[in-house]
Amino acid sequence: MTARKPTMEDVARKAGVSLKTVSRVVNQEPHVSPVLQRRVQEAISALGFRRNEAAARLARGATMLTIGLIMENISNEFYSRLAKSVEAAAADHEALVVFGSYEERPERERMLVESMYARGVDSLIIVPSAADHGWLAEHGGLTAVFVDRVPHGLERADVVLLDDVRGGRMATEHLLARGHRRIALISDDEALSSVHARATGYRAALREAGAGVDESLVVRGVFDPWRAGHEVARLLELDDPPTAFFATNNRAAIGIIQALRERPERPAYVGFDDFALADVFNPGVTVVRYDVTRLGRSAVDLLLSPSDTPRRVKVPVELVARGSGELPPPAR
């Protein structure tokens, strides 16, 4: 999302004063009458003007640009890897990155955005929550790029996405090719565009294979491995249980592994997102994988090359077969 930032010239025109007067007020210099100060401050408030902190830093002899990165939860491996890739890409531009996690709380996400903005960080990379983001349009001086998900409520936004529909389809088709027809979906909030797209690919692959979509095998709202494991155990107790699982995130995939440790069943499963030690388990975890470095670097590139036209970058995905997704359904 980009918008033209109001300038001191805009403030001067609206207040009916000289540019020098605006500069003195903004920089808290003396020799400006209270009447003119009030007119300038009113114009600043009306326009949403904020001093160009980058220019101010340059004037002081500093050159460090600061980028804010706001994510769901940096303790999740996906987000920690994304943070590392953004930091590496920013370093190429001699920029500093500051981080914030909103931990599935949209009100904290907004607080982080506004707190960073108030402190002079007007270049943000955001992994948006499922909440409406129309309020961001109130910050005319803010430049933001969204990663992994499309923000709700913004018509114009720069977004870097994974090819989520293809990833969901790829995982499901892989299981279908091994003879599975009862394939369960373990996902988090389908109000998130990425989760919705992965579920769309899953449903499309089942329908095209003539297997149909059994909504009793679809689990939504799973945000931690424990809950995922609980749902897997519940599904395996059905009279006609699933023979395979597709997990739309790495936490759900770990939950599947935990749930199957003490069970005699050997269902197949594929996860979306690679994770550490996925190739160490027996069997290794088949995953839909992508280049996190490309994801982070694309976001930084968009952020530092603003455009009047909204842009969308799609990062490709690939399926990595390691064993768990190749297990056949049980003989009947």
Image (cartoon, rainbow, N blue to C red):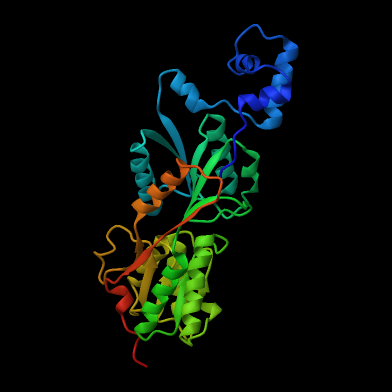
- Horizontal side of 20 relative to 171 (left or right) equals right
Which x, y percent locates residue 10? 66, 27
Which x, y percent locates residue 244? 40, 78
Pick out the residue farthest to the right.
Answer: 35
* Vertical comparison of 159 with 303: above or below: below
Which x, y percent locates residue 212? 51, 84
* Vertical comparison of 199 with 98: above or below: below
Which x, y percent locates residue 110? 58, 42
- Horizontal side of 200 relative to 31 (left or right) equals left
Number of marks drawn: 0
Q: Tell me the residue at 50%/64% (across/down).
A: 195
* Vertical comparison of 14 with 77: above or below: above
Task: Kindly tell me whether residue 238 is visible in this rendering.
Answer: no
Pick out the residue farthest to the bottom.
Answer: 332
Q: Quadrant of the C terminus?
A: bottom left
Q: Tell me the residue at 42%/67% (across/down).
A: 229
Q: Tell me the residue at 39%/34% (across/down).
A: 95
- Which of 253 and 274 lies nearest the eye of the viewer? 274
Res 117 quadrant in image: top right
- Which of 313 and 285 lies nearest the eye of the viewer? 313
- Which of 66 and 216 lies nearest the eye of the viewer? 66
